[in-house]
Image (cartoon, rainbow, N blue to C red):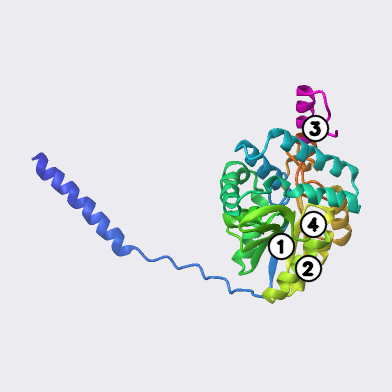
Amino acid sequence: MRRFWQRGKDQDHKSAGEAAAAAAAAAEPEPLPEPDPAAAAFFDVDNTMMRGASIYYFARGLAARKLFTMRDLAMFAWGQTAFRLRGTENSEHIGSAKEAALSFVAGQDVAKIVRLSEEIYDEVMADRIWHGTRTLALQHLDSGQQVWLVTATPVEVARTIAHRLGLTGALGTVAETRDGVYTGRLVGNLLHGPAKAEAVRALAHREGLDLARCAAYSDSINDLPMLTVVGHPHAVNPDPELRQHARDQGWPIHDFRTGRKVTMIALPAAAGAGAVAGGVVAGVALHRHYRARSRFSLFT
């Protein structure tokens, strides 16, 4: 009797399944957006797409793998912090920032650094992406536009971030290589300030973009050249100067920070004109740590 009862139940399940399958209608596929080959969006990385400075997280990941010492990291971060606090962009300071930017990968194999950048992104950068900014980028992709990161971070790291976020690509600082190994020097200058605008112009020429139809997003007044080279500039998590400028110009302002704080406490901020590393909190903490362990200052 129980067997007949179970057989009836199985038949009921089968009938229900067949009925559901017969009644199923294939969902209408979402129409793909028409590609918009003349428009693109350009996003700064540090404190715009990501909380803090990507190069600092990258350097910290390399230090954790013993590719250079924590004291080197402290000097690197503190030097960039001092540069940020000066608030100046004279040739001497730019030269110092440029010299420090990739010195810690001198002699390293390019393929190895690319692989490590992917590991370090997954470990410490992925959780620091601003979801609101990423949503803005995806909206441009959904409308059929290209989306590029534009950052002073080494281009290998920038490409990793762009790839992980599903973006078109990245423009970043280019390091000189020889026979697949970093020399520790840069090709030209840091991709910062006016250099970002030049990179956007060059890419627009290559890709056939109409800059008047393009958008750009940044947190820093230092990126004003990039923001003003496009037709649709946006301020994201802006510093006070950029916030005021955006208000004066009627630009959209997006702020994804809790309490709209300009400084991210306990997170390294982008290093001002150097835009390569550091952060006041991280730099000061590391500086004090090493002063406590030795009798000499980081500035000697």
Indicate the quadrant containing the N terminus: top left, top right, bottom left or bottom right: top left
Q: In this view, does 233 lie to the left or right of 109?
A: right
| Separation of marks 1 and 4 at Cα, in angstroms | 14 Å
Q: Position of residue 137 (x, y in %)?
A: 65, 59
> Of the residues tagged 4 and 2, which is closer to the observer?
4
Residue projecting furthest to the bottom:
208
| Separation of marks 1 and 3 at Cα, in angstroms | 32 Å
Taking the spot 57% from the left edge, 71% from the top edge, the residue there is: 33
Which of marks 3 and 1 precedes in the sequence? 1
Q: What residue type is labelled 1?
A: Phe
- Which residue position holds label 1? 42
Q: In this view, does 76 lie above or below 117?
A: above
Q: What residue type is labelled 2?
A: Val
- Which residue position holds label 2? 230
The reply to whether dot 2 and dot 1 touch (C-beta < 8 Å) is: yes
The magenta span reads: 283-300
The reply to whether dot 1 and dot 3 touch (C-beta < 8 Å) is: no
Q: In this view, does 178 lie to the left or right of 220?
A: left
Circle number at residue 262: none
> Of the residues tagged 1 and 3, which is closer to the observer?
3
> Of the residues tagged 2 and 3, which is closer to the observer?
3
The reply to whether dot 1 and dot 4 touch (C-beta < 8 Å) is: no
Q: Does the magenta stretch include residue 249?
A: no
Considering the whole magenta stretch, tell me its main secondary structure: helix
Which of marks 4 and 1 precedes in the sequence? 1
- Which residue position holds label 4? 192
- Which residue position holds label 3? 284
- Taking the image as drawn, is residue 209 in sight? no
